[in-house]
């Protein structure tokens, strides 16, 4: 009797190599409906944008005119890098003629970019930070893209996208791309958090980690301690605590996506609190904090302003900023405990006076 032929390729390997981003979304939706197909195609387009950006980043040092500043200042008041402009243009180009999204709202653009030919069909809006942490670009350190997909509600006749001013709980999908030693895309549609690694030989994002769970507690605290004297007292109390107690270590890259990915994988907390000069903090709610909060919550973590869940914050303007405390549940709760302690002391003092 001939022994059963051993498969040339282990089935799970071949199957995994076929688990592309688009296919995974359909698996997650457990449906081939028009909505599922749309979302699958949308994620596929985000994957294409990521591949185009990764390709330019990998060769920027060899290209004329790829690095450095444009000389302009964006709506955030930040000096614009040439790679910021390129990344933003990639997202626009990728979604034109896609029939998928009607509007693009970006950190780099004061007002949303409309794609009228898509609007009758594509009732989605992509909110995104095309290249976050671009201060790292010229020194070849990790940078990222952050995105969320929202449903367009209403007709938005005046082009001010007021219907976008909704809490993060309204997000349909969210995630980020980490341009590091490998290019990773991490996303959620509310059914867990899944990571894909770009296989350059295939030109495809292939599933590399499914149903990622953030540790309940982690050793890492990630903050720019250069702002220590600008922080409110409760945050300083927290930093003094982790300085004086065993089991904590500081990690901070200056690029949000890489810092958040470390927290997702190893546990801990990232914090960008408000300061005396900027009580609302630096990070933007719609296309940085809320998408990342969706991912971290789906992985079993938390994201807070210090007093409110990020996912419940209703923005009053497109480029609104919030303080951000995000990561493992235990670590976020510890930061909040110092805020609550100071609030109790203030309340007691108010009663006594
Ligand atoms: P700071 C990059 O400019 C960014 O928006 C985030 O990627 C990063 O977490 C933060 O700002 C860094 O800010 O004030 O520490 O340089």
Image (cartoon, rainbow, N blue to C red):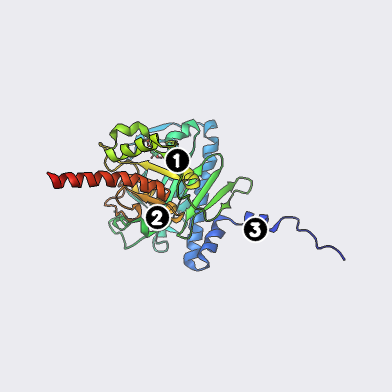
For marks 1 and 3 on the same chain, the one whose residue lies earlier in the sequence: 3
Image quadrant where residue 117 sits: bottom left
SS at badge 3 = helix
Residue occupying image coordinates x 52% and y 51%: 47
Inter-mark Cα distance, 2 to 3 = 37 Å
Give the residue furthest to the right: 1
Image quadrant where residue 273 sits: top left
7 relative to 322 in the view: left or right:
right
According to the image, label 2 marks what residue?
115
101 relative to 275 in the view: left or right:
right
Ligand 1 within 8 Å, label 1 CB: no
SS at badge 1 = strand
Image quadrant where residue 70 sits: top left
Q: Which mark is drawn over residue 15?
A: 3
Up-down: is 70 above or below 173?
A: above
**Which of these two is toward me, 324 or 152?**
324
SS at badge 2 = loop
Residue 51 rendering spot, x and y as whole percentages: 53, 46
- The answer to whether one can see residue 105 in this image is no
Circle 1 or circle 3, nearest the eye = 1
Mark 1 closeness class: few <14, some 14–19, many ≥20 residues within 10 Å: many
For marks 2 and 1 on the same chain, the one whose residue lies earlier in the sequence: 2
Mark 2 closeness class: few <14, some 14–19, many ≥20 residues within 10 Å: some
Inter-mark Cα distance, 1 to 3 = 35 Å
**Which of these two is toward me, 25 or 331?**
331
Residue 263 rendering spot, x and y as whole percentages: 46, 44
Residue occupying image coordinates x 20% and y 44%: 346
Inter-mark Cα distance, 2 to 1 = 42 Å
Q: Which mark is drawn over residue 220?
A: 1
For marks 2 and 3 on the same chain, the one whose residue lies earlier in the sequence: 3
Q: Quadrant of the C terminus?
A: top left
Q: Quadrant of the N terminus?
A: bottom right
């Amino acid at each position: 009797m001939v022994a059963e032929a051993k498969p040339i390729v282990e089935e799970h390997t071949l199957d995994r190599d076929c688990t592309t981003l688009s296919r995974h979304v359909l698996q997650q939706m457990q449906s081939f409906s028009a909505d599922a197909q749309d979302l699958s195609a949308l994620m596929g387009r985000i994957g294409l944008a990521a591949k185009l950006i990764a390709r330019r980043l990998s060769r920027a040092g060899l290209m004329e005119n790829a690095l450095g500043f444009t000389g302009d200042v964006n709506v955030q008041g930040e000096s614009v890098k040439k790679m910021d402009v390129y990344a933003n243009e990639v997202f626009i180009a990728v979604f034109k003629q896609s029939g998928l999204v009607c509007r693009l709202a970006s950190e780099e653009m004061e007002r949303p970019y409309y794609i009228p030919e898509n609007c009758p069909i594509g009732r989605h809006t992509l909110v995104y930070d095309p290249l976050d942490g671009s201060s790292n670009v010229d020194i070849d350190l990790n940078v990222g893209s952050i995105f969320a997909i929202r449903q367009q509600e209403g007709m938005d006749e005046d082009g001010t996208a007021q219907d976008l001013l909704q809490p993060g709980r309204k997000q349909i999908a969210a995630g980020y791309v980490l341009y590091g030693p490998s290019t990773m895309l991490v996303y959620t549609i509310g059914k867990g958090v899944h990571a894909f690694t770009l296989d350059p030989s295939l030109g495809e994002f292939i599933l590399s980690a499914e149903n990622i769970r953030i540790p309940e507690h982690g050793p890492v605290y990630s903050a720019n301690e250069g702002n220590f004297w600008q922080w409110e007292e409760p945050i300083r109390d927290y930093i003094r605590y982790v300085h004086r107690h065993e089991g904590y270590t500081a990690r901070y890259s200056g690029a949000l996506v890489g810092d958040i990915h470390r927290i997702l994988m190893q546990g801990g907390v990232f914090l960008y609190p408000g300061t005396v000069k900027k009580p609302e903090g630096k990070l933007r709610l719609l296309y940085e904090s809320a998408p990342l909060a969706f991912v971290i919550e789906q992985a079993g973590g938390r994201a807070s302003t210090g007093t409110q869940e990020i996912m419940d914050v209703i923005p009053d303007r497109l480029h609104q900023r919030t303080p951000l405390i995000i990561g493992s549940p235990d670590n976020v709760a510890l930061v909040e405990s110092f805020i609550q302690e100071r609030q109790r002391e203030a309340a007691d003092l108010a009663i006594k006076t």
